[in-house]
Image: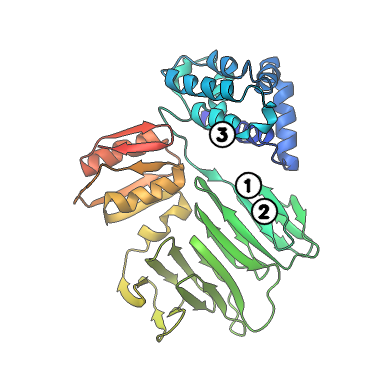
């Protein structure tokens, strides 16, 4: 029950950030926002204070008994610098306040009476895990903010959530791009029935209806694919370095950088460099690594590469820098390493993605022999 309360609170914080930055709300967000305003007079007072730059810092400050005095001073200084500018035009100040102090923390605390206010802060002493969030950009230029659902489906009428709720009509659009931010993930079912889970900080470009002799999509970041079998129309996934050809199979493609990993779960795929070379055919349990214009094939533990889809960050004998990049993407933080940092430790890591960042960092400290400190959205490694 408490986890649901936390989720509701930080959902409101996301909505409030969009309101003060004049970002359009979805129908679900409008309903959630109005219900929150009507639920408690304190909520309405807090919202009104957000529109008054003179009361903004004080309204937040009164709700906290934490050691964030430096953050408050920073916010107050920014507000003084912008005092002559209408509040709704100072999106940077509003965003800095929300991200540094955490409106979600205020909402959560004000709906609780059992624990002291200092038990949870969104940024500063701890960071909550990511969630289902993404946007769709249509070829027509329209952008759609997606609610915190499990995923979406492409239908004849447009998009709908997996529970059947309509998302949008996509008249005149031929293609779309699903984009997840850091701290977000999402799942989509394409028009042919193929399912794609998109990890944090990723994008998938696809047609709303597949035409021609092959089904082609383009990926940046990481995605897990369960491809609908259709021998007459092969499924092609392209990245900036390679293309993967499948008929009907399940595989994971990690393409965040110049080193890319294709890991086959079942079925069969062929991996080809974009510019030259013969394809490498994978069997289940095998992996193709694309680096420096070559393809290396090896056997691997597939759980290390698909665990993220099922709520875990997993790595067998991985370095801190490797597992750190996954943590950065999911918790939307940046690891700051000392100059000339070297850590030769390799560890087996299995992290529940629903844990707060502080719990994750304890595991990092125990396994890699380092110390960590959260400062806002940065994690300092010592």
Residue closer to the observer: 14 or 80? 80
Cα distance between the residues tagged 3 and 1: 13 Å
Q: What residue would you read off at disc 2?
A: 162
Residue closer to the observer: 101 or 52? 52
Q: Position of residue 315 (x, y in %)?
A: 32, 54
* Quarter placement of the C terminus: top left
Residue 1 appears in view: no
In the rendered image of this protein, does residue 210 appear above or below residue 85? below
Disc with the residue nearer the chain's start (2 vs 3): 3
Q: Are marks 2 and 1 in contact (CB under 8 Å)?
A: yes
Q: Is residue 343 left or right of residue 188?
A: left
Q: What residue would you read off at disc 1?
A: 149
Q: Is residue 157 left or right of residue 260?
A: right
Residue 273 appears in view: yes
In the rendered image of this protein, does residue 27 appear above or below residue 266? above
Q: What residue would you read off at disc 3?
A: 7
Disc with the residue nearer the chain's start (3 vs 1): 3
Q: Quadrant of residue 158?
A: bottom right
Q: Residues within 10 Å of mark 1 (few under 14, many from 20)?
A: some
Q: Position of residue 240 (x, y in %)?
A: 48, 70
Cα distance between the residues tagged 2 and 3: 20 Å
Q: Position of residue 34 (x, y in %)?
A: 75, 29
Q: Residues within 10 Å of mark 2 (few under 14, many from 20)?
A: some
Cα distance between the residues tagged 2 and 1: 8 Å
Residue closer to the observer: 259 or 236? 259
Q: Position of residue 107 (x, y in %)?
A: 59, 24
**Residue shown at 46%/30% (left/top)?**
123
Label 2 secondary element = loop
**Residue shown at 47%/39% (left/top)?**
129
Q: Which mark is residue 8?
A: none
């Amino acid at each position: 029950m408490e986890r649901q309360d936390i989720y509701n609170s930080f959902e409101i914080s996301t909505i409030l950030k969009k309101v003060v930055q004049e970002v359009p709300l979805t129908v679900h967000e409008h309903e959630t926002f109005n219900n929150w305003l009507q639920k408690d007079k304190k909520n309405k007072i807090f919202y009104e204070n957000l529109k008054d730059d003179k009361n903004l810092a004080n309204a937040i400050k009164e709700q906290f008994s934490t050691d964030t005095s430096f953050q408050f001073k920073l916010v107050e200084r920014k507000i003084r610098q912008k005092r002559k500018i209408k509040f709704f035009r100072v999106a940077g100040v509003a965003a800095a306040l929300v991200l540094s102090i955490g409106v979600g923390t205020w909402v959560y605390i004000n709906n609780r009476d059992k624990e002291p206010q200092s038990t949870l802060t969104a940024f500063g002493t701890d960071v909550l895990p990511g969630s289902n969030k993404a946007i769709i950009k249509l070829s027509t230029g329209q952008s759609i903010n997606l609610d915190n659902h499990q995923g979406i489906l492409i239908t004849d009428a447009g998009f709908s959530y997996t529970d059947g709720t309509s998302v949008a009509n996509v008249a005149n659009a031929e293609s779309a791009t699903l984009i997840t931010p850091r701290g977000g993930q999402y799942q989509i079912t394409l028009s042919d029935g193929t399912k794609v889970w998109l990890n944090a900080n990723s994008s998938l470009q696809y047609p709303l209806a597949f035409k021609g002799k092959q089904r082609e999509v383009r990926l940046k970041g990481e995605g897990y694919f369960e491809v609908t079998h259709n021998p007459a129309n092969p499924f092609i996934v392209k990245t900036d370095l390679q293309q993967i050809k499948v008929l009907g199979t399940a595989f994971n493609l990690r393409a965040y950088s110049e080193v890319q990993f294709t890991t086959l779960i079942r079925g069969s795929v062929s991996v080809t460099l974009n510019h030259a070379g013969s394809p490498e055919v994978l069997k289940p349990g095998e992996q193709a690594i694309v680096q420096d214009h070559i393809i290396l094939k090896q056997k691997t533990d597939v759980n290390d590469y698909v665990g993220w889809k099922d709520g875990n960050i997993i790595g067998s004998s991985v370095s801190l820098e490797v597992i750190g990049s996954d943590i950065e993407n999911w918790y939307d933080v940046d690891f700051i390493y000392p100059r000339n940092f070297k850590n030769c430790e390799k560890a087996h890591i299995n992290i529940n993605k629903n844990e707060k960042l502080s719990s994750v960092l304890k595991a990092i400290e125990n396994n890699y022999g380092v110390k960590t400190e959260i400062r806002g959205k940065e994690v300092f490694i010592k």
